[in-house]
Amino acid sequence: MGVTASLNPTPPATAAPAAPAVALEPTDEALIELLRDGSTSAGEILVKRYCQPLLRYLHRLVGSDHLAEELHQQAWVSVMDHLDRFDKSSVAGGFKGWLFRIATNKANDHWRSSGRDRSAKQALRMVTDSHAPDASHRLDGAEQEAKLHEAIARLPENQRQVLMLRYYGNLKFVEIAETVGCPLNTALGRMHKAMLKLKQMMEQ
Amino acid sequence: MTSLLHQLENNEAILLMYLADELSAEDRAEVEQLLGSDGSMRAELDRLRGLRDGTVAALAGLDATTRLPVSQSVAVRRATRMMRQWQIDRAHAPPPEAPIRELRFPWWSYPLTTAAAVLIAFLVWWGNRSERPAAPDVARNYEHVPPGPQDVLEWKEEMAANHLEASLNPFEEEFAKFIINRPVDEGIARLEAMANRPDDLDLIFMNATERNW
């Protein structure tokens, strides 16, 4: 059973493929080798492969369109900078795990530099500005959507990271623990709490 | 797959790992055995499964109605352009500086060699210092008494000068001063007169007598 199925029985269209869907598709590692040799087209395939889940992941973490896109580019710059040092055997989750770890670090760097409160406010402002339903067109579905946005924004940062790494990165819990730098039990505990809090806030 | 089951601290962790299918076959079998015998654990599993499915459904619904921060084509184009630029920059970057030549010998050999050199230099200095010029051997000096009277006089002067220069024995000095320009007999008499200091006189007296001063 794939990792995706464990959290997500019906994988979202945006989630990264758990395994290559077509046998002829080059693996991440093969593309990395080509990219090391200077092939930009190999890089383009990699970017396309992870663009949606990575952008969604960053967007859920930072809550800003502009910032998510900025961090997405920064993550790929960092990939290029450290490409020669990437070793599949030493990174949990292979290239995907490495990429999401880089993206997570970029988001953490942003939080550290700009301050946690400001980001939280920004996320909440994003929720209220662009997703809060207009009173004249208020629908139950839209209300739920806005509520969920707000609930995600209110999750503690470390719980949100674990939940989003699981959902968008399709990483195993062991890989998530390594990515965020915590014990496996802690990662599982954060996942459980994040799901519980989302449920509670949605029911309020 | 290594066994993780006994590293997990509580039922939630065990069941989340079970639901995620991240346990080994052996661990799964053990969990299923527990689930078969423990009703509360089965209820907990159902609760977690519902929680997980609800979260997944909620996030999937959110993604379906939320646009990407930027269109995928734009994001890919920007990232690819950045990659191309990165590679151009690297191609035009100055070649890396030649690595500093590594030491030929292990690092510890250098202080060791220095210490050994200092020690050898000290030993050489010490050896030279202890090799002082030997004190003139009075007995040896008197071994070659020349035959003629003129030669005896020169020899005596030379001996006297040597004794004076060495100045190691006050008596030798006194005796040397005395015998210069004096007959040998007087020298012997002088030596006999100074017999109250036999320890100092023995050597010279014996030599002088043996050579018929």
Image: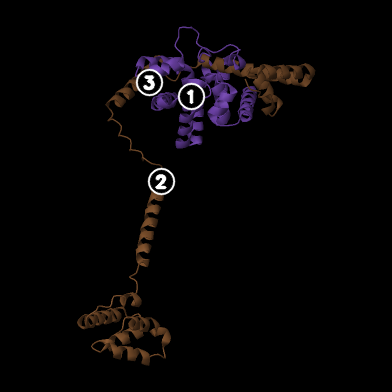
Chain colours: A purple, B brown
- The x, y position of residue B146, in whole percent, is 25, 78
Binning the other alpha carbons within 10 Å of mark 1 as few (below 14), some (14 to 19) or many (20 upward) gives many
Q: Residue at x 36, y 38 (%)?
A: B102
Q: Is residue A74 above or below residue B133?
A: above
Q: Nearer the viewer, mark 1 or mark 3?
A: 3
Task: Name which residue type carries label 1.
Answer: Trp
Q: Earlier in the sequence, mark 1 or mark 3?
A: 3
User: As shown in the figure, which amino acid type bears the numbered disc 3?
Assistant: Arg
Q: Which residue is mark 1?
A: A98
Q: Give amino acid for label 2.
A: Ser
Q: In which quadrant will I find the N terminus of chain B?
A: top right
Q: CA distance from mark 3 to mark 2?
A: 41 Å
Pointer 2 residue: B109
In the drawing, what numbered circle is on residue A36? Answer: 3
Spatial distance from mark 2 to mark 1, Cα to Cα? 43 Å
> Share a chain, discs 1 and 3?
yes
Q: Give the quadrant of residue B24.
A: top right
The lab-note entry on whether marks 2 and 1 share a chain reads no
